[in-house]
């Protein structure tokens, strides 16, 4: 923006503000400087660098598994009958001290999930879906040990209560 345009903009703002003053308002007298400066120095531009990303820890271990819902068939199960189905759920993974280590917000369409975690002991507590009526399906809580450099495979089943 040129100096002339800036001076016109400032003058316009001052006129607009003066029009908004209550009746009887008398501004203090301020000595006016020259409306156009006689010399202008160019602003100094400092080069800016993009922020350095924090290094991410490489985790080559964690938990992988499936979530299922069952039984889904009434009565005794026949030999060729599959009475479970994949289920989407939210899993809360906590450390032994009760702090949350991770959250898997939903599983895949086939019920599978995966979460990267460092080696250690964890408890997985699936959250009950608030949209589903009580008492079923009831989730199970699972204790898991994750070994360094490996993924622990688990299966979590939500019990429908159907027998």
Image (cartoon, helix red, strand yellow):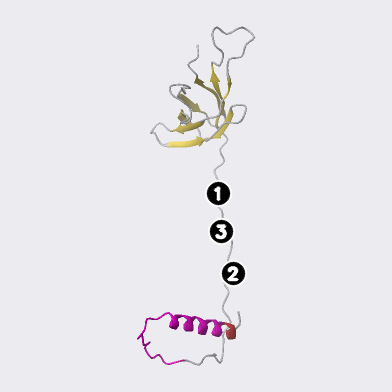
Residue range highlighted in magenta: 6-32
The image quarter containing residue 31 is: bottom left
Q: Which mark is residue 6?
A: none
Front label number (1 vs 3): 3
- Which residue position is annotated with label 3? 51
75 or 123: which is nearer to us?
A: 75
Q: What is the crowding at mark 2: few (fewer than 14 residues within 10 Å), some, or many (at least 20)?
A: few
- Which residue position is annotated with label 1? 55
The correct choice, above or below, for 11 with respect to 89 in the image is below
Instruction: Name which residue lies at 46% across and 25% down.
Output: 133
Instruction: Name which residue lies at 55% across and 29% down.
Output: 88
Q: CA distance from mark 3 to mark 2?
A: 13 Å
Relative image position of residue 64 (x, y in whole percent): 57, 28
The reply to whether discs 1 and 3 touch (Cβ–Cβ < 8 Å) is: no
Task: Pick whichever of labels 2 and 1 is earlier in the sequence.
Answer: 2
Instruction: Name which residue lies at 54% across and 43% down.
Output: 57
158 or 133: which is nearer to us?
A: 133
Q: What is the crowding at mark 1: few (fewer than 14 residues within 10 Å), some, or many (at least 20)?
A: few
């Amino acid at each position: 923006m040129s100096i002339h345009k800036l001076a016109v903009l400032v003058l316009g703002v001052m006129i607009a503000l003066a029009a908004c003053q209550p009746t009887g308002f008398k501004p203090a007298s301020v000595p006016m400087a020259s409306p156009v400066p006689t010399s202008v120095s160019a602003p100094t531009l400092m080069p800016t660098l993009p922020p350095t990303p924090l290094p991410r820890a490489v985790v080559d271990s964690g938990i992988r598994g499936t979530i299922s819902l069952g039984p889904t068939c009434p009565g005794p199960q026949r030999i060729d009958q599959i009475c479970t189905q994949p289920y989407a759920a939210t899993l809360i993974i906590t450390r032994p001290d009760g702090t949350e280590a991770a959250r898997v917000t939903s599983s895949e369409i086939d019920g599978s999930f995966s979460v990267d975690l460092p080696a250690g002991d964890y408890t997985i507590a699936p959250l009950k879906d608030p949209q589903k009526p009580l008492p079923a399906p009831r989730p199970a809580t699972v204790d898991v040990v994750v070994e360094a450099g490996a993924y622990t495979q688990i299966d979590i089943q939500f019990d429908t209560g159907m027998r």
